[in-house]
Amino acid sequence: MTRTSLPEAAPPPVRLGRVSIGALGILALALGALQSVVEPALPLLQRELGVSPAEGALVGNTLLITGAVVAPVAGKLGDRYGGKRVLVALTAVVSAGGLLAALAPNLPVLLLGQVLQGVMVGALPLSFILVRTHLPPQESQVAIGVVVALFTGGGMVGMLFAGPISESLSWHWMFALPTLAIAATTVAVSRLLPHDPPARSENGIDWPGVVLLSGTLLAFMLGLVTVTRDGGLPPLAVGAVAVVVAALAAGWVAVERRAPSPMVDLRMLAKPAMWHACVLTFVMSTSSGMVLFLLPQLFAVSGDGYGFGAGTTGIGLFLLPGAVAGAVSDSVGGIAVRRFGSRAVVVAGSAVTAVTMIALAWLHGAEWQLVLAKVLTAFAAGVGTTALLAGTATAVATKDIGIATGLLVVTRVIGVALGAQVAGALLDAGTGSTTGLPAESAFATGFAVAGLVAALSLLVVRLTKKGAQA
């Protein structure tokens, strides 16, 4: 009698141990520290490298732009080649970028290092996928919470220790030390974490879309800083920059419309809930980007009757309460959305930011005023962003949630980067020829513009509400 052979069941995934989860947590801690060292040290970097505020804004923006491009691609790479393999590769690129930044002799090399570091945005979601693959649902939620908390804590550690490290050693070491931790932890992760089999996708990665979107964002930001520095460019050169950006953007749209598996599904933008959320995210993020750039600059400057002449350590301490408020706002934002609705939360966050920034245009003579403004705007931006993400996730089909939230992430990055560059351009325009310092009026103008941009969100909410009712 012949026995019929049954197909072998797939072996269950290897369970993650505490040591493996600890390695992922330490990796997240080091990544958060490396990401956050630039914000308090930006005035120091501008002095050391001899660059203008508008050029200095590029240091943080290049990391954001790379992250916006990598974020939608990282998951597809993990599906095709395996989550662990891609995670290790991405953190190796981050380590190379951190090392390059630590050895950078000038701004272009530092910017290249920041570009490579930006792939860390894709590393964290891959770690979440690995945790969910190798742990039961309840345990995976706890582990993901630990990793997120350590990444947030790493951001606070980097903000606090960027000053002492750069002032006692040099600014190079504030990049080098987190990078060494990332490199060592990457080796540990590659040895401790079990391999996960790749899940082959029917469609390939939209590499033309990735390249064109990267080129569009980089051309836009580099063009913006070139146009706004040293008195600007001739009108013909400005037109040439605009034509290049428009051509790249048009090429990207054409590719995405024809791609079988586009990087960004443009059909999502036709849905009212989606484009309303994108417009609001862009406006709110532009205001936030201006605040993120202006406050450290005012803490650092020491002008005639304004500014505080704070070093990197002092700036980090001043900014820390705002970082804590931003971390708390994520959980509070979810509760507020369930209780009051996403539209009401967005209106409240925009109103708080607008009032705070307009008030700061006149009241910025004491440290506590700037610290309080940072806390209020960070909290308002956090709850507003959470509200938009939550509202969009409930307004689209389940299968489109990933695409919709990815679009909002990219929109937010573009808004923050644009806001920082505009703020840098305003300070450049208000820099005195004799002192070499931005005038107090330049900061007041920047705060007022940030407040007006935030107030524009209220108008957008009003108009979109009327459109929805119609």
Image (spheres, helix red, strand yellow):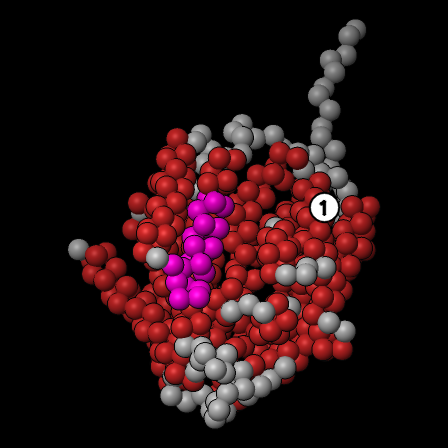
The answer to whether residue 196 is left or right of residue 234 is right
**Magenta residue span:** 213-233
Front-most of residues 361 and 264: 361
Q: Residue furthest left?
A: 470
Front-most of residues 238 and 54: 238
Task: Give the residue displayed 48% in from the left and 75% down from the top.
Answer: 294
Location of residue 19 (image quadrant): bottom right
Which quadrant is home to the C terminus? bottom left
Residue 229 magenta-drawn? yes
The residue wearing badge 1 is: 88
Near mark 1 (Cα within 10 A), the count class, few <14, some 14-19 or many ≥20, is many
Q: Amino acid at mark 1?
A: Val
Residue 357, visible in the rendered structure: no
Quick check: 269 above or below 301? Answer: above
Q: Residue furthest top?
A: 1
Quick check: 461 above or below 236? Answer: below
Task: Give the residue displayed 77% in from the left and 42% down from the top.
Answer: 194
Task: Give the residue displayed 71% in from the left and 61% down from the top.
Answer: 102
Which quadrant is home to the N terminus? top right
Residue 440, visible in the rendered structure: yes
